[in-house]
Image (cartoon, rainbow, N blue to C red):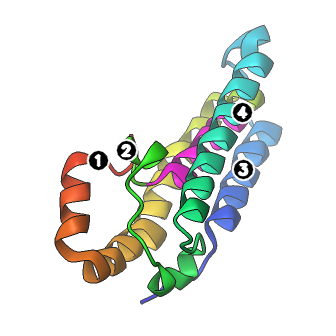
Amino acid sequence: MKPVIPPPVILIFFIGIALGIDVFSPFDLLLGQSRLPLALVFGGVGVLIAVLGVLQFQKHKTTINPHKIDKAKALVTGGVYRFTRNPMYLGMLLVLIGVVFYSRDVLALVTLPGFVVTLNRLQIQLEERALRAMFGDAFEAYCARTRRWI
């Protein structure tokens, strides 16, 4: 089985949920006046981590398209991939955290585990299965020393 929904679409979906919760919920309890700086920091760090992941893939001339995992030419384990197996997805999560902080709504926090579970089930598990088949013991060793998220 191949992934069906592109990860950026999943992120946009959860951003929409977080902002929708903010519109309809009276629980603006998070952070007060510090919400904008924290939102910008999390969002900016998220974009930076995701871009570093993309640049590592480009450096190794392998596909960043999760729907074409069978076109992967290299197992990327250096750079930001030394710290997380999924920097692009971690970056997206940090952007979502920034949106939640910006919304200030405590109920929007439910989008965070929802996003992680959705990506794990619809994307990451499928990618890992394919990478395990392609790179075997090298991928297993990488998984043993590097966490999926952080």
- Percent coordinates x, y for residue 114 in the rendering: 51, 53
For the residues labelled 1 and 3, the Cα–Cα distance comes to 28 Å
For the residues labelled 3 and 4, the Cα–Cα distance comes to 16 Å
Given this view, does label 2 or label 3 mark the residue nearer the observer? Answer: 2
**Residue 15: mark:** 3
Q: Which residue is mark 2?
A: 82
Which of the marked residues, 4 or 1, is nearer the chain's N terminus?
4
Residue at screen point 28% across, 76% down: 135
- Inspect the magenta stretch and tell me whether residue 88 lies in it: yes
Q: Split into 4 quadrants, where in the image is the C terminus?
A: top left
Q: Which residues are magenta?
A: 86-100
Is residue 1 visible in this depiction of the protein?
Answer: yes
Name the dominant secondary structure of the magenta segment. helix
Which of the marked residues, 1 or 2, is nearer the chain's N terminus?
2
**Amino acid bearing label 2:** Arg
Given this view, does label 4 or label 2 mark the residue nearer the observer? Answer: 2
Looking at the rendered structure, the secondary structure element under dot 1 is loop
Q: Taking 94 as reference, is 120 left or right?
A: left
